[in-house]
Image (spheres, rainbow, N blue to C red):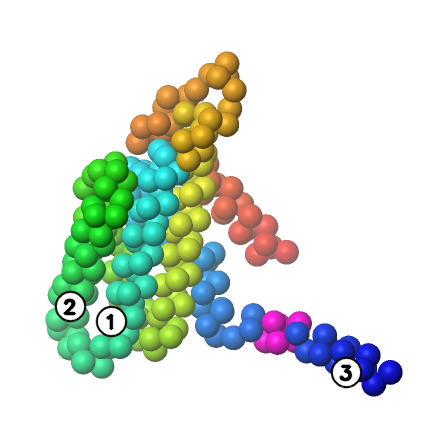
Amino acid sequence: MGDSANQNSVNLKIPQKGYKLLKTKSWMVFKEGVWHNNPIFGMMLGLCSTLAVTNLVSNALVMSAAVTLVLVVNSAIISSLRNLIPDRVRMIAYMLIISSLVITVDLILKIVLPEASKALGPYVALIITNCILMGRAEAYAINNSVGLSVMDALGVGLGYTFSLTLISIFRELIGFGSILGFTVLPGELPRIALFTIPPGAFFALGTFILIINTIRNRRSES
Protein backbone atom coordinates (compact mmCIF):
# COMPACT_ATOMS: atom_id res chain seq x y z
CA MET A 1 0.00 0.00 0.00
CA GLY A 2 2.78 2.34 0.95
CA ASP A 3 4.74 1.48 -2.21
CA SER A 4 1.76 2.32 -4.45
CA ALA A 5 1.27 5.64 -2.68
CA ASN A 6 4.92 6.53 -3.19
CA GLN A 7 4.72 5.51 -6.86
CA ASN A 8 1.69 7.75 -7.41
CA SER A 9 3.46 10.70 -5.82
CA VAL A 10 6.47 10.19 -8.11
CA ASN A 11 4.21 10.01 -11.17
CA LEU A 12 2.51 13.25 -10.19
CA LYS A 13 5.81 15.12 -9.92
CA ILE A 14 6.93 14.37 -13.48
CA PRO A 15 4.32 16.43 -15.35
CA GLN A 16 4.66 19.22 -12.78
CA LYS A 17 8.37 19.49 -13.52
CA GLY A 18 7.66 19.41 -17.23
CA TYR A 19 5.06 22.13 -16.80
CA LYS A 20 7.53 24.30 -14.89
CA LEU A 21 10.09 23.82 -17.65
CA LEU A 22 7.61 25.14 -20.21
CA LYS A 23 7.15 28.25 -18.07
CA THR A 24 10.83 29.13 -17.73
CA LYS A 25 12.20 32.24 -19.40
CA SER A 26 14.66 30.17 -21.44
CA TRP A 27 11.85 28.10 -22.92
CA MET A 28 9.77 31.20 -23.69
CA VAL A 29 12.75 32.81 -25.45
CA PHE A 30 13.35 29.62 -27.45
CA LYS A 31 9.68 29.37 -28.45
CA GLU A 32 9.60 33.00 -29.55
CA GLY A 33 12.52 32.37 -31.87
CA VAL A 34 10.88 29.34 -33.45
CA TRP A 35 7.43 30.85 -33.99
CA HIS A 36 6.87 34.58 -33.45
CA ASN A 37 10.43 35.60 -34.34
CA ASN A 38 10.72 33.06 -37.14
CA PRO A 39 13.24 34.72 -39.47
CA ILE A 40 11.51 33.68 -42.71
CA PHE A 41 7.79 33.57 -41.95
CA GLY A 42 7.87 36.17 -39.17
CA MET A 43 10.64 38.73 -39.63
CA MET A 44 11.14 38.17 -43.39
CA LEU A 45 14.94 38.02 -43.06
CA GLY A 46 17.42 35.86 -44.92
CA LEU A 47 15.18 35.57 -47.97
CA CYS A 48 18.02 35.51 -50.52
CA SER A 49 19.36 32.18 -49.28
CA THR A 50 15.81 30.90 -48.90
CA LEU A 51 15.04 31.54 -52.56
CA ALA A 52 18.40 30.21 -53.75
CA VAL A 53 18.99 26.94 -51.90
CA THR A 54 15.54 25.46 -51.28
CA ASN A 55 15.28 23.65 -54.62
CA LEU A 56 16.61 20.53 -52.86
CA VAL A 57 16.03 19.39 -49.28
CA SER A 58 19.69 18.38 -48.89
CA ASN A 59 20.86 21.89 -49.78
CA ALA A 60 18.35 23.43 -47.38
CA LEU A 61 19.47 21.21 -44.50
CA VAL A 62 23.17 21.98 -45.01
CA MET A 63 22.50 25.72 -45.25
CA SER A 64 20.25 25.58 -42.16
CA ALA A 65 22.90 23.75 -40.14
CA ALA A 66 25.57 26.26 -41.19
CA VAL A 67 23.44 29.30 -40.35
CA THR A 68 22.28 27.84 -37.02
CA LEU A 69 25.84 26.98 -35.96
CA VAL A 70 27.13 30.44 -36.81
CA LEU A 71 24.10 32.05 -35.17
CA VAL A 72 24.51 30.17 -31.87
CA VAL A 73 28.27 30.67 -31.58
CA ASN A 74 28.01 34.32 -32.64
CA SER A 75 25.31 35.06 -30.05
CA ALA A 76 27.30 33.31 -27.33
CA ILE A 77 30.48 35.26 -28.12
CA ILE A 78 28.76 38.64 -28.41
CA SER A 79 26.78 38.09 -25.21
CA SER A 80 29.91 37.09 -23.28
CA LEU A 81 31.72 40.20 -24.56
CA ARG A 82 28.77 42.59 -24.33
CA ASN A 83 30.31 44.63 -21.50
CA LEU A 84 33.63 44.93 -23.34
CA ILE A 85 32.43 45.99 -26.79
CA PRO A 86 32.20 49.82 -27.08
CA ASP A 87 28.98 51.07 -28.63
CA ARG A 88 30.76 53.01 -31.35
CA VAL A 89 32.43 49.88 -32.80
CA ARG A 90 29.88 47.19 -32.00
CA MET A 91 28.75 46.78 -35.64
CA ILE A 92 32.36 46.31 -36.74
CA ALA A 93 32.83 43.79 -33.92
CA TYR A 94 29.74 41.88 -35.08
CA MET A 95 31.05 41.71 -38.63
CA LEU A 96 34.51 40.53 -37.57
CA ILE A 97 33.09 37.75 -35.40
CA ILE A 98 30.52 36.68 -38.01
CA SER A 99 33.09 36.73 -40.83
CA SER A 100 35.51 34.57 -38.85
CA LEU A 101 32.79 32.04 -38.03
CA VAL A 102 31.46 31.88 -41.59
CA ILE A 103 34.93 31.37 -43.07
CA THR A 104 35.52 28.55 -40.58
CA VAL A 105 32.20 26.86 -41.39
CA ASP A 106 32.81 27.26 -45.13
CA LEU A 107 36.21 25.57 -44.87
CA ILE A 108 34.76 22.74 -42.77
CA LEU A 109 32.03 22.14 -45.35
CA LYS A 110 34.58 22.04 -48.17
CA ILE A 111 36.51 19.36 -46.29
CA VAL A 112 33.68 17.29 -44.79
CA LEU A 113 30.91 17.76 -47.37
CA PRO A 114 32.61 18.84 -50.61
CA GLU A 115 29.64 17.96 -52.85
CA ALA A 116 27.20 19.94 -50.69
CA SER A 117 29.63 22.84 -50.53
CA LYS A 118 29.93 22.83 -54.32
CA ALA A 119 26.15 22.67 -54.75
CA LEU A 120 25.61 25.65 -52.45
CA GLY A 121 28.29 27.63 -54.26
CA PRO A 122 28.81 31.16 -52.90
CA TYR A 123 25.75 31.12 -50.65
CA VAL A 124 27.62 29.74 -47.64
CA ALA A 125 30.10 32.62 -47.80
CA LEU A 126 27.17 35.01 -48.16
CA ILE A 127 25.96 34.00 -44.68
CA ILE A 128 28.15 36.92 -43.63
CA THR A 129 25.56 39.28 -45.11
CA ASN A 130 22.58 37.39 -43.67
CA CYS A 131 20.46 39.89 -41.73
CA ILE A 132 19.41 37.22 -39.22
CA LEU A 133 22.88 37.12 -37.66
CA MET A 134 23.29 40.85 -37.31
CA GLY A 135 19.67 41.23 -36.22
CA ARG A 136 19.85 38.73 -33.33
CA ALA A 137 23.22 40.11 -32.23
CA GLU A 138 21.90 43.68 -32.03
CA ALA A 139 18.36 42.92 -30.86
CA TYR A 140 19.14 40.27 -28.25
CA ALA A 141 22.67 38.99 -27.64
CA ILE A 142 24.22 42.38 -26.84
CA ASN A 143 21.61 42.98 -24.10
CA ASN A 144 21.18 39.54 -22.48
CA SER A 145 23.05 36.74 -20.74
CA VAL A 146 24.90 34.01 -22.60
CA GLY A 147 22.33 31.37 -21.67
CA LEU A 148 19.35 33.34 -22.91
CA SER A 149 21.22 34.48 -26.02
CA VAL A 150 22.05 30.87 -26.92
CA MET A 151 18.41 29.83 -26.41
CA ASP A 152 17.28 32.73 -28.59
CA ALA A 153 19.77 31.75 -31.30
CA LEU A 154 18.74 28.09 -31.11
CA GLY A 155 15.08 29.05 -31.45
CA VAL A 156 15.69 31.34 -34.41
CA GLY A 157 17.99 28.74 -35.98
CA LEU A 158 15.36 26.03 -35.58
CA GLY A 159 12.74 28.38 -37.02
CA TYR A 160 15.03 29.04 -40.00
CA THR A 161 15.60 25.30 -40.44
CA PHE A 162 11.87 24.59 -40.25
CA SER A 163 11.11 27.25 -42.87
CA LEU A 164 13.78 26.16 -45.34
CA THR A 165 12.95 22.48 -44.92
CA LEU A 166 9.25 23.06 -45.45
CA ILE A 167 9.79 25.10 -48.61
CA SER A 168 12.44 22.72 -49.97
CA ILE A 169 10.24 19.65 -49.47
CA PHE A 170 7.48 21.34 -51.43
CA ARG A 171 9.81 22.51 -54.23
CA GLU A 172 11.72 19.26 -54.61
CA LEU A 173 8.56 17.17 -54.49
CA ILE A 174 6.69 19.25 -57.07
CA GLY A 175 9.70 20.05 -59.25
CA PHE A 176 11.61 16.76 -59.21
CA GLY A 177 9.12 14.28 -57.73
CA SER A 178 11.62 13.33 -55.03
CA ILE A 179 12.68 14.08 -51.46
CA LEU A 180 16.36 13.91 -50.52
CA GLY A 181 17.00 12.37 -53.94
CA PHE A 182 14.57 9.47 -53.44
CA THR A 183 11.74 9.34 -55.95
CA VAL A 184 8.38 9.77 -54.24
CA LEU A 185 5.93 10.66 -56.98
CA PRO A 186 5.23 8.16 -59.78
CA GLY A 187 7.08 8.84 -63.02
CA GLU A 188 3.88 9.37 -65.01
CA LEU A 189 2.92 12.41 -62.92
CA PRO A 190 4.04 15.68 -64.52
CA ARG A 191 6.77 17.73 -62.88
CA ILE A 192 6.53 21.50 -62.60
CA ALA A 193 9.97 22.75 -63.61
CA LEU A 194 9.17 26.27 -62.37
CA PHE A 195 9.73 25.15 -58.78
CA THR A 196 13.25 23.94 -59.53
CA ILE A 197 14.49 27.49 -60.25
CA PRO A 198 14.62 30.58 -57.99
CA PRO A 199 11.49 32.27 -59.42
CA GLY A 200 9.45 29.26 -58.34
CA ALA A 201 10.67 29.86 -54.79
CA PHE A 202 8.67 33.12 -54.72
CA PHE A 203 5.45 31.19 -55.26
CA ALA A 204 6.34 28.61 -52.62
CA LEU A 205 7.45 31.25 -50.11
CA GLY A 206 4.34 33.37 -50.65
CA THR A 207 2.08 30.35 -50.24
CA PHE A 208 3.63 29.33 -46.93
CA ILE A 209 3.67 32.89 -45.59
CA LEU A 210 -0.07 33.10 -46.34
CA ILE A 211 -0.71 29.80 -44.54
CA ILE A 212 1.42 30.68 -41.48
CA ASN A 213 -0.09 34.16 -41.12
CA THR A 214 -3.61 32.71 -41.40
CA ILE A 215 -2.83 30.26 -38.59
CA ARG A 216 -1.38 33.06 -36.45
CA ASN A 217 -4.37 35.32 -36.99
CA ARG A 218 -6.82 32.57 -36.06
CA ARG A 219 -4.87 31.78 -32.89
CA SER A 220 -4.74 35.44 -31.88
CA GLU A 221 -8.47 35.82 -32.45
CA SER A 222 -9.24 32.76 -30.36
Q: Which class describes the residues within 10 Å of circle 3: few (<14), some (14-19), or many (20+)?
A: few
Q: Please state, as top left, top right, bottom left or bottom right, where the C terminus lies in the image.
A: bottom right
Sequence order check, earlier mark of 2 and 3: 3
167 shown above or below 135: above
Q: Residue at x 28, y 65 (%)?
A: 73
In front: 110, or 96?
Answer: 110
Res 138 label: none
Under mark 3, the amino acid is Asn
Snapshot quadrant of residue 169: top left
Q: Which residue is mark 3?
A: 6
Indicate which label's residue lies in the foreground, 3 or 1.
Answer: 3
201 shown above or below 25: above
Left or right: residue 66 versus residue 40 is left
Q: Alpha-carbon distance for marks 3 and 1? A: 47 Å
Residue 202 seen: no
Q: Alpha-carbon distance for marks 2 and 3? A: 56 Å
Q: Please state, as top left, top right, bottom left or bottom right, where the N terminus lies in the image.
A: bottom right
In front: 88, or 2?
Answer: 2
Q: Which residue is mark 2?
A: 93
Q: Residue at x 33, y 56 (%)?
A: 68
Res 78 label: 1
* Horizontal and vertical percent position of residue 64: 34, 49
Left or right: residue 72 versus residue 31 is left
Q: Secondary structure at mark 3?
A: helix
Left or right: residue 19 versus residue 187 is right
Q: Mark 1 and 2 residues: CB-CB less than 8 Å, in contact?
A: yes
* Horizontal and vertical percent position of residue 211: 51, 42
Under mark 1, the amino acid is Ile
Q: Secondary structure at mark 1?
A: helix
Q: Secondary structure at mark 2?
A: helix
Numbered range of the magenta stretch = 15-20
